[in-house]
Amino acid sequence: MLGGKCLGKVSGPEEMSIRGLHQQGTLTIVRRSSSKSKSGNFENSPPHNPDTSYLSSQSVDLEEILDNVDLTTDSLPAVDTPDACDKAALRLRCLLRQLQHGEISAELLQRNLHYAARVLEAVFIDETKVSSGGNECARSSRRGAGLTSSSLGGGLDPDGPQGHAVVTQKRKLRTPVWARLRNIHISNPLRSIRLADEDDELSEVQPDAVPPEVREWLASTFTRQLATTRRKADEKPKFRSVAHAIRAGIFVDRIYRRVTNTALMQFPPEVVKVLKTLDDWSFDVFSLNEAALGTPVKYLGYDLLNRYGMIHKFKVPPAVLECFLGRVEEGYCRHRNPYHNNLHAADVAQTMHYILCQTGLMNWLTDLEIFATLVAAIIHDYEHTGTTNNFHVMSGSDTALLYNDRAVLENHHISASFRILREDDCNILQNLSREEFREFRSLVIDMVLATDMSFHFQQLKNMKNLLSLAEPSVDKSKAVSLVLHCCDISHPAKRWDLHNRWTMQLLEEFFRQGDKERKLGLPFSPLCDRNNTLVAESQIGFIEFIVEPSMQVCSDMLETILAPLNVKDTTDEPNNGKTSL
């Protein structure tokens, strides 16, 4: 019913797949093309002048050294000290080894990756901050260090106590133990490249082997550094530290993705089978509920956030996400509502996914906005009481008193959900920056408040007026708010058997409210008198005056939003003879 073009779907990469789903050929949502990393091995020659305080490569057994590495993070040296690189490198090797045997906890691995990433960044900052007069001296003193920084998803925490350290004095790096061990092979996404004793230039890095995120980071970071570096006009810039940063960053990023993948929640085969139809407009959430043994939000919410890459992009610990979804599911089931329960939450979230994916709306939004949109859909009716806002106001409930009779339930859904997110074991936003958190929270609040039916006609009127302008400019918050509102009332547009079942459950919930109103001596709310409600007529009126106009305005809005994107896609590839997705 909603206009737009179908977005192409590809098989999910190993890093982003759920193990059970991956085996069944699950789909991963992509918004941009990405390059496939190549894997290779490399060896590092022994240093010419080893430090006597470290073990010689001829006498050290790699396995013995790694067995003795203490992976706790309580007594690590500061990231700007000489020992930090050696410690970080050894820990990375040890982490990789333990991952292969499944002996490392996700929490301990994440802490070590955070530390290693900060060390890498400190080394890079140290090298790029050196003035032109001391470049050669600094470069020679650092040869053999082998690793620099990356701002990739290895776990940089800008708000952490050691994040983004600026080194104020030159570092005297000793050759690390791991670099002295012979025949050490690392799964490198670039071709076989030596780590030490060479002035690598950016041209040596294969462009198609570098992920887009790395290229974006490289362009922005190095350009700023270049502007402050003094050099002769005819001097060719060297990119040794930048090239190393790419290699080390990808290495850390791959480890982080690997542990995330191994820690992902297990999906029962029955759930996997149902989720294969997640991209369908008339997805059967009742079948999912049966397969998931009454926990559809847990599996559908997890799968959606994983498909869109939110778990990796925002460094959401899998165990924390599972806990959060479990708590949300419990809240939806608290009042045992026939309609406003966890099935409704899963249904709305799946419908939101359909519109994001199949119309191409996701290409208009940032990753953070997609994250907020999916979470808003999941929590939009959290702890719903099974009664309307009007019932709360007329009965003088505590919730109505708390929110001053304004959007009573919607305010509670938001407030209660963010209380969960304040708990450490449920805080899926723990790795967002302050600015990202504020933007995320603001968008979720706007979207959930817009599901208040008392705003329905004003919301449609405002959007119609906006679209009638000669050059309409649609605000993202208003756009996704209207989409969520349409998803919330979309079941009449689904398959008949699904719509009929939803209708019966909604009317039963209304009738239960009517029973409460009778006991309290309150007048019946519309459609709440079980002895005097015309089911067919009520649904026809609901479809004709509420659902159909909402869907039409939403469709017009999406066409306005996406038309420029589709034109741009067409003009970008004029000679390929293919229609842009």
Image (cartoon, rainbow, N blue to C red):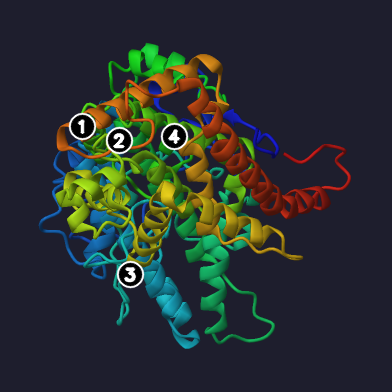
* Position above or below: 443 against 336: below
Query: Is the Cβ of the residue at disc 3 closer than 8 Å to that at disc 2?
Result: no
In the image shown, does 38 or 462 lie closer to the viewer? 462
* Position above or below: 66 against 512: below
Q: Which residue is mark 3?
A: 164
Which of the 4 image quadrants contains residue 294? top left
Query: What amino acid type is highlighted by mark number 3?
Result: His
Query: Is the Cβ of the residue at disc 4 closer than 8 Å to that at disc 1?
Result: no
**Separation of disc 4 and disc 1 at Cα?**
31 Å
* Sequence order check, earlier mark of 4 and 1: 4
In the image shown, does 93 or 489 lie closer to the viewer? 489
**Separation of disc 4 and disc 3 at Cα?**
40 Å
Q: Residues within 10 Å of mark 4 (few under 14, many from 20)?
A: many
Query: What amino acid type is highlighted by mark number 4?
Result: Val
Q: Which residue is mark 2?
A: 524
Query: What amino acid type is highlighted by mark number 1?
Result: Arg
| Secondary element at tag 3 | loop
Instruction: In the rendered structure, find residue 31 and report the number of the disc placed on it.
Output: none
* Sequence order check, earlier mark of 2 and 1: 1
**Separation of disc 1 and disc 3 at Cα?**
63 Å
Q: Which residue is mark 1?
A: 518
| Secondary element at tag 1 | helix
* Position above or below: 519 against 203: above
Mark 2 or 4, closer to the camera: 2
Q: Which residue is mark 4?
A: 348
